[in-house]
Amino acid sequence: MQPPSSDIKDILEDAGLGLTFGTNLFVGFEPDSPANCTTIYDTPGFKPESELEKGNDIYKPSIQIKVRNNSYVDAGTLINQIKDELHNITGQTVNGSLYIHIQCSQEPFSLGKDVNGKSQWVCNFDLMRT
């Protein structure tokens, strides 16, 4: 089972939002450039729901997605498009993991500007997968 960030990256690449891994979509770290990019981070989730039979556990990781952009409005628009794409995904298999449910844990919010004056928006998601 790979990190959830890698699975979510594949969902977002296929979503038609203009995100391409290694170009303007990144996993685990945010590069210095390009200025306009989206990064997916694995964040602490919740304890798994353990079943008596090994292999039937339900895992509850979480992720954070950060959009950085020259434009405050463009960053806010993209993070909301990402939220709309991911929120309430149910029963989707990605790279061998069944995503029972993906849910936005709060509305996207602005982190203000980074040290280079780029706007930053984030949104967090709770996941359930087997």
Image: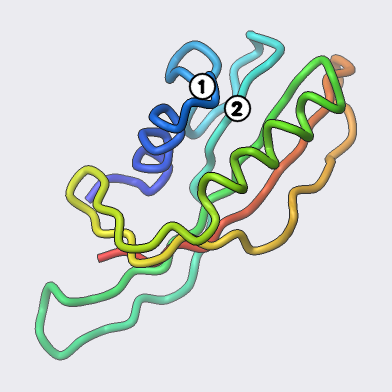
Q: Which residue is mark 2?
A: 38
Q: Residue drawn at (29%, 74%), measured in percent from left and top?
A: 58
- Tell me if residue 45 comes above or below residue 51 in the rendering: above
**Which residue occupies the extreme bottom position in the image?**
52
Image quarter of residue 127: bottom left
* Number of numbered discs on residues: 2
In primary-sequence order, the first of circles 1 and 2 is 1
Are the residues tagged 1 and 2 within 8 Å (C-beta)? Answer: yes
Q: Amino acid at mark 1?
A: Leu
Front residue (pair 13, 69): 13
Image quarter of residue 97: bottom left
Res. 91 mark: none
Residue 3 x/y as whole percent: 34, 46
Which corner quadrant holds the C terminus? bottom left
Front residue (pair 85, 9): 85
- What is the spatial separation of the Cα atoms under label 1 and label 2, in whole angstroms? 8 Å
Q: Amino acid at mark 2?
A: Thr
Color encoding of the figure: rainbow
Mark 2 is surrounded, within 10 Å at the Cα level, by few (under 14), some (14 to 19) or many (20 or more) other residues, namely: many
Q: Residue drawn at (83%, 19%), measured in percent from left and top?
A: 118
Residue 95 x/y as whole percent: 21, 43
Q: Which residue is mark 1?
A: 19
Circle 1 or circle 2, nearest the eye: 1
Please, what secondary structure does the residue beneath circle 2 have? strand
Please, what secondary structure does the residue beneath circle 1 have? loop
Residue 120 x/y as whole percent: 79, 31
- Tell me if residue 95 comes above or below residue 113 in the rendering: below
Image quarter of residue 14: top left
- Tell me if residue 109 comes above or below residue 39 in the rendering: below
Q: Is 59 on the left or on the right of 65, as rendered? A: left
Q: Is 84 on the left or on the right of 46, as rendered? A: right
